[in-house]
Image (cartoon, rainbow, N blue to C red):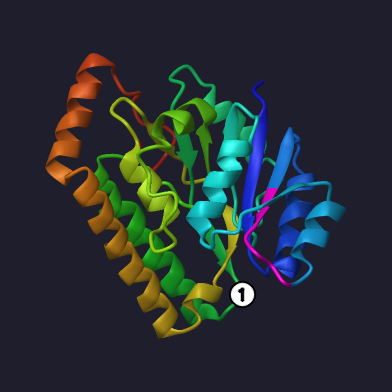
């Protein structure tokens, strides 16, 4: 069994962070460390994290990516499990991550979808069937493998150490999960497990403006990644990487065609 660090970036999310940390504490396979990266909170987020026994780091550079990257750098676990402050993982989340990443194929990362809570029926439907489905399937086709979902994924620390210089970790204007997905090196693989579901707040979809901002940021992230590693070049590099070092087949129990 590998050691697992759970990394949670946070900015002024004390109430939701408390629920998230309670869910992490209730895991059937305990985390070896829990790191909350405070991004300049003015509420009780730090006190909540400390009361839950989490290790608190302070990242003054605002943005989810700077905070996440700081947490990844500081983590000591062999596996880095990523949640948002509003994530609610089921009790077997870490146990399943450990099992999936240590099957015979030893994939690089594992991710799964979110089940949205809060908001209303319309915003939850938009979040699940428009935003997340489009992200998973359309971006997955571009990448040639499943994209990581920022509220629910885990990656090997060894892989992070290899890709950390290729991501745009200091930028707050890109989606960290998509940027990391684009930066994965040839031979690195992602398992998309459709049953590995965490609860996620639907609050970003409460307004059309909020949804539009997230979509625009997604296109911007693609443009940033495309300039750094052009799509056709990236796909060709990954094919050559696969030829030299085969990528594991998709999980036969998964309904997604995007596992690589």
Query: In the picture shown, does residue 172 fall above or below 229?
Result: below
Q: Which stretch is magenta?
A: 36-42
- Picture quadrant where residue 213 is located: bottom left
State whether residue 50 is above or below residue 129: above
Residue 187, how many percent across, how many down? 31, 25
Q: Quadrant of residue 253?
A: top left
Q: Magenta span has 224?
A: no
Q: Residue at 55% x, 49% y: name it.
A: 68
x%, y% of residue 238? 22, 30
- Residue 2 in percent (x, y) is at 64, 23
Left or right of 245, for residue 194: right
Q: Would residue 105 appear left or right of 78 to someone viewing this image?
A: left
For the N terminus, which image quadrant? top right
Q: Which one is nearer the viewer's eye here, 241 or 130?
A: 241
Residue 83 at x, y percent in the picture: 60, 51
How many labels were placed on the picture?
A: 1
Q: Is residue 40 magenta?
A: yes
Identify the residue under disc 1. 118
Residue projecting furthest to the right: 51
* Observer able to see residue 146: no
* Residue placed most toward the observer, 78 or 191: 78
Badge 1 density bin: few <14, some 14–19, many ≥20, Cα 10 Å: few
Does dot 1 land on a helix, a strand or a loop? loop
Using the rendered view, name the quadrant where residue 242 is placed.
top left
Q: Residue at x 46, y 51 (%)?
A: 149
Taking the view exactly as shown, the residue that stands out farthest to the front is 60
Q: Is residue 252 visible?
A: yes
Task: Quadrant for the C terminus, please.
Answer: top left
Side of 164 where 100 appears, left or right:
right
Q: Is residue 128 above or below residue 160?
A: below
């Amino acid at each position: 069994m590998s050691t697992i660090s759970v990394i949670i970036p946070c900015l002024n999310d004390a109430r939701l962070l408390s629920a998230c940390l309670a869910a992490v504490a209730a895991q059937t396979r305990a985390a070896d460390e829990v790191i909350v990266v405070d991004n300049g909170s003015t509420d009780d987020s730090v006190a909540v994290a400390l009361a839950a026994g989490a290790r608190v780091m302070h990242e003054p550079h605002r943005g989810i990516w700077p905070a996440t990257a700081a947490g990844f750098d500081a983590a000591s676990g062999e596996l880095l499990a990523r949640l948002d402050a509003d994530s609610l993982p089921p009790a077997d989340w870490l146990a399943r991550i450990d099992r999936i990443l240590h099957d015979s194929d030893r994939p690089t990362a594992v991710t799964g979808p979110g089940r949205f809570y809060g908001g209303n029926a319309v915003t939850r439907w938009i979040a699940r069937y428009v935003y997340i489905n489009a992200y998973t399937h359309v971006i997955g086709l571009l990448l040639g493998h499943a994209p990581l979902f920022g509220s629910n994924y885990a990656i090997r620390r060894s892989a992070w150490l290899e890709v950390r210089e290729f991501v745009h970790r200091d930028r707050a204007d890109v989606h960290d999960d998509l940027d990391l997905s684009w930066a994965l090196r040839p031979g690195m693989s992602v398992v998309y497990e459709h049953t590995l579901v965490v609860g996620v707040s639907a609050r970003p979809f409460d307004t059309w403006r909020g949804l539009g901002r997230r979509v625009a940021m997604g296109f911007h992230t693609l443009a940033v990644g495309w300039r750094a590693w052009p799509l056709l070049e990236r796909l060709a590099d990954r094919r050559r990487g696969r030829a030299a070092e085969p990528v594991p087949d998709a999980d036969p129990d998964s309904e997604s065609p995007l596992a690589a």
